[in-house]
Image (cartoon, grey):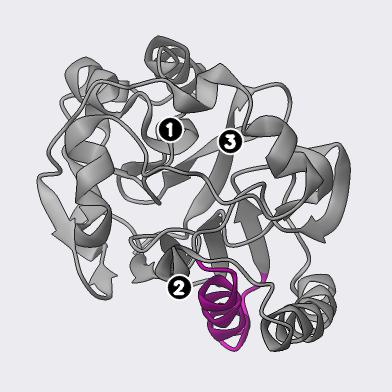
């Protein structure tokens, strides 16, 4: 099977919100941007010389509005089936992310006041329900979908055979990509310790690069060093009873 090429599809700004076009024997789209961005994503796919109607699959990494917001629209525009994890079916089916958002720091607390994050999207029912590792060979990619819960219960990543990890919101660039290359938490996590465990599990697979939803691709070694500092920070907060997660609400 041909090598998978990873093509970023900017949705907001240069890197603030990204979808990804994965090019192998057939093209696959990972994530569907914010509500109303479907036509723009469709046109950007075409701009890379790919007929959007050739899309084999749309993979949604998790149930936040900036990642599944135009899934229903893109399915209408391309005819491609949508894959999503069973644990995030409620947001997909209602078009609304689970509330409240749980900020990871000051950026999240500021963004939590943004009305766009509390908007609704067109609901959809994934044709392909993910509950475990899912090989994408039948969709033309030398890659697999891997559940990586924590950011949300149904978060997933896509790992290619060459080692590229399309990581959703497992990790981000600092300040939504304003400081490129510097690992940081995204603005929200449902379960910070669970997300960190998923991130460390993915790093143990020795990915060559992490392609993230917010910012530029990240170097795995830099992410490993950040993850160890984050482990110590979160352990301290947990010991003091100050670590909030959806499981404790």
Q: Which mark is residue 18?
A: 3
Instruction: Specify the segment rendered in magenta.
Output: 191-208
> Can residue 16 be seen in the rendering of this structure?
no
Question: Which secondary structure lies at badge 2?
Answer: loop
Q: Secondary structure at mark 3?
A: strand
Distance from the alpha carbon under mark 3 to that under mark 1: 13 Å
Q: Is residue 184 visible?
A: yes
Say which of marks 3 and 1 sits in front.
Answer: 1
Judged by its main secondary structure, the magenta piece is: helix
Residue 82: within the magenta?
no
Measured Cα–Cα span from mark 3 to mark 2: 22 Å
Q: Is residue 149 above or below residue 173?
A: below
**Which residue is denoted by mark 1 in the rendering?**
65
When asked about the image quadrant of residue 54, the answer is top left
**Position of 232 relative to 218 (above/below):** below
Q: Viewed as shown, does residue 215 lie left or right of 204?
A: right
Q: Earlier in the sequence, mark 3 or mark 2?
A: 3
Q: What residue lies at 59% left-to-right and 45% top-to-bottom? A: 213
Q: Which residue is mark 2?
A: 161
Q: Position of residue 168 (x, y in %)?
A: 52, 53
Q: Quadrant of residue 74?
A: top left
């Amino acid at each position: 099977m041909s090598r998978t090429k990873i093509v970023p599809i900017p949705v907001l700004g240069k890197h603030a919100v990204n979808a990804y076009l994965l090019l192998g024997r057939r093209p696959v789209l990972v994530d569907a941007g914010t509500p109303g961005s479907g036509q723009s994503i469709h046109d950007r796919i075409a701009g890379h010389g790919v007929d959007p109607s050739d899309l084999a699959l749309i993979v949604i990494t998790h149930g936040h509005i900036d990642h599944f917001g135009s899934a229903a629209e893109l399915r209408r525009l391309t005819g491609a089936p949508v894959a999503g994890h069973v644990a995030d079916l409620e947001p997909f089916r209602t078009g609304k992310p689970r509330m409240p958002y749980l900020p990871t720091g000051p950026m999240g607390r500021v963004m939590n006041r943004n009305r766009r994050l509390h908007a609704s999207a067109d609901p959809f029912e994934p044709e392909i329900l993910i509950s475990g590792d899912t090989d994408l060979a039948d969709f033309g990619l030398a890659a697999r979908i891997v559940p990586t819960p924590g950011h949300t219960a149904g978060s997933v990543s896509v790992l290619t055979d060459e080692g590229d990890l399309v990581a959703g919101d497992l990790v981000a660039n600092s300040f939504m990509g304003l400081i490129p290359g510097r690992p940081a938490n995204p603005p929200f996590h449902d379960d910070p310790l669970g997300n960190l465990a998923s991130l460390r599990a993915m790093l143990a697979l020795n990915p060559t690069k992490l392609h993230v939803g917010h910012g530029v691709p990240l170097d795995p070694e830099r992410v490993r060093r950040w993850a160890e500092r984050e482990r110590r920070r979160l352990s301290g907060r947990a010991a003091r009873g100050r670590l909030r997660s959806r499981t404790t609400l």
